[in-house]
Amino acid sequence: MGHRRIPDRGMDKERLFKMLESYRGGDVDWHSGKVFGYVYDAGPEVERVCKEAYTMFLSENGLDPTVYPSQLFLENDVVAMAASHLKGGEKAVGSFTSGGTESIILAVKCARDYARATRPEVKEPEMVLPTTAHAAFHKAAALLGMKPVMVPVDTVSFKASPAAMEKAITDSAILLVGSAPSYAHGVVDPITELGAIAGRHNLLLHVDACIGGFLLPYFREAGVSVPDFDFRVPGVTSISMDFHKYAYTAKGASVVLYRDKELRKHQFFVCSTWPGYSVVNPTLQSSKTVGPLAATWAVLNFIGNDGYLAMARELAHAAHRLIDGIGRIDGLYVLGKPEMTLVAFGSDTVNVFCVADEMKLRGWYVQVQLAFSEGKENLHLTLAPSSVKMVDALLNDLAQCVKRAREVKSTGLSQMIRERFGALDPSRIDADLFRQVSAMAGIKDNRLPDRMAEVNEILNSLPSEMCDLVLIEFFNNLFVPTQDSVATASRR
Ligand SMILES: *Cc1c(COP(=O)(O)O)cnc(C)c1O
């Protein structure tokens, strides 16, 4: 017993790859087109180009562009395409990053250090966020010692409320945030109004266009009405945009753009006070593979404007059918007016967590979203090109699943959870309490049950601080090193 060790002798290559393949057995089958989240599949041809370019640059190190001019060229070329796509103007610059979260952390770090340089009197910098802003802003705030000021959104449109945002600005505010669109509801915040507010108060404005920045310009070209959100809007100072979503490139690909170099320099980290090589890091990582950058460069060039536009037309058409179709299913309603390819829907008559379980039994992946300050629990779909052909099948099954969910009687679990834990001090959460909650949810030995409705219902009913603690406890138990006995068994 004890931790599994490095094998005494090297393993046969064929056997090893068989093992790797077998480990994928339990994953969602993303090639099926039935997975409405996590994957942005544009078909096998794009996938091949992406993988080839990725592996070609897998071993190059993006640590030092003076040693690898190829990386410097590829990054400048990719950032240029991104900046022109979002109408950045002559002076726009940016950095290629590993994902939306990194792009956002960097934009926040840049804002913080810009404020340190220009407004040293601000001791505890704040960023003003609509409640629908992505969790990455909270992560950035936690890492960078900033205070997130959460502002309620409109309860019908789920868009940021400019008046409420302006009211929340204090002398310590340094940054405003808007989304284009928000992940949860797929609606574009009123960026033009937020830009005017940023201008009046002399604040930076970051537009989180991680998921929409790439696709929205094509939607507009395809005739869909899209609110202004890019650098043409006065007041916008930085934008994040992911390539690993609707640019269909490898995971680990995003960009953060700034209106000019003067602002971006506050994003950099340098260190020449240690005895090794001078560290100059534009982004968070130091040594890093050039694979995702090469893959992005290759896929952008391979698909091209005409290819992206053609896919956008199909997506726009299918998204319309999807949103319209969900609205017609008895018992369901769409939240807000989705403006892209993301749709959230809820119900006042059936338990949506049961609907998600029923859908899973039929091979669909739909994402659960818990209640937040301005809305109750709901389900979320992300439409990717490979799922366009599945929209009608999804709508059919969804209608059936809603019927099935009607037959499920309420267990009164939420009520019980609220009574039992609602008034409890979150600091009193410990392993023992976690065991109680787990038992109620049907979790045994940290293994999730097949049906997730109870688990979701409990998470949804717990106060959010407590929900966070329960999730940490669960995942802390999930990531435990393989034990030797298990490793031996799986090798056989
Ligand atoms: C996906 C997403 C992010 C975070 O991106 P990751 O690539 O998962 O780190 C941030 N904001 C929005 C709106 C997103 O959709």
Image (cartoon, helix red, strand yellow):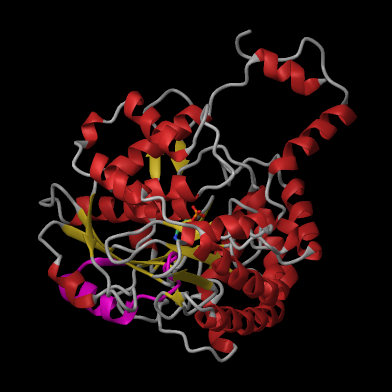
Q: Is residue 369 magenta?
A: no
Side of 244 relative to 88 (left or right): right
Horizontal and vertical percent position of residue 316:
60, 82
Residue at 49% x, 37% y: name it.
442
Horizontal and vertical percent position of residue 453:
49, 51
Res. 374 visible in picture: yes
How many labels were placed on the picture?
Answer: 0
Quadrant location, the C terminus: top right
- Name the outermost residue toward the bottom: 223
Depth check: give the residue in front, 265 or 238: 238
Horizontal and vertical percent position of residue 270:
39, 40
Side of 187 relative to 11 (left or right): left
Q: Where is residue 299, by image quadrant? A: bottom right
Res. 73 visible in picture: no
Depth check: give the residue in front, 16 or 453: 453
Vertical comparison of 415 with 382: above or below: above
Side of 166 relative to 232 (left or right): left
Residue at 59% x, 44% y: name it.
450
Residue at 75% x, 16% y: name it.
488
Depth check: give the residue in front, 166 or 342: 342
Vertical comparison of 463 with 484: above or below: below
Quadrant location, the N terminus: top right
Q: Where is residue 384, by image quadrant? A: bottom right
Depth check: give the residue in front, 30 or 328: 328
Q: Is residue 185 magenta?
A: yes
The magenta segment is: 182-205
